[in-house]
Amino acid sequence: MSFSSDIKQELNKNSSLANKDLVKYELAGYLISKNSIIENGQLVKYSTESDYNINRFSKLLSNLNVNHNIELIRKSLCYYF
């Protein structure tokens, strides 16, 4: 596991996702990463090969009641919402 993955996991161990503002900020961090693509101003794709990021990103979206679909494309996981 990479150093950044270790740090992300450590920072989020105690996160209960109860504070919606913190959830929004963390989601914004994912969305401004190089792994996010916005198509046609509406469709957002987030691609990763990290199981941790897959699960965390999905939890953040679910916590904010954002409908999303997960699709496997070329061995990368993509979220659409």
Image (cartoon, helix red, strand yellow):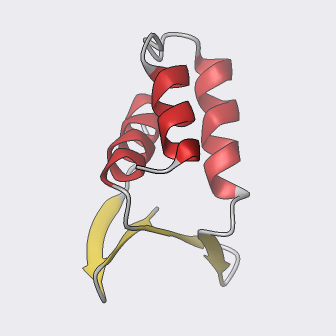
Using the rendered image of the protein, determine whether residue 14 is visible from the camera's viewpoint: yes
Where is residue 33, by image quadrant? bottom right
Count the marks: how many? 0
Q: Position of residue 49 (x, y in %)?
A: 37, 67
Which residue is at the front of the view, 79 or 67?
Answer: 79
Q: Is residue 37 left or right of residue 17?
A: right
Which residue is at the front of the view, 78 or 49?
Answer: 49
Q: Is residue 67 above or below residue 24?
A: below
Q: Is residue 17 left or right of residue 54?
A: right
User: Residue at image x 65%, y 21%?
Assistant: 22
User: Residue at image x 37%, y 36%?
Assistant: 59
Q: Is residue 67 left or right of residue 11?
A: left
Which residue is at the front of the view, 4 or 20?
Answer: 4
Using the rendered image of the protein, determine whether residue 66 is visible from the camera's viewpoint: no
User: Residue at image x 63%, y 35%?
Assistant: 26
Report the residue that reaches farthest toward the bottom. 74
Q: Is residue 67 above or below residue 36?
A: above
Where is residue 19, by image quadrant? top right
User: Residue at image x 69%, y 45%?
Assistant: 29
Where is residue 8, by image quadrant? top right
Q: Position of residue 61 (x, y in %)?
A: 45, 42
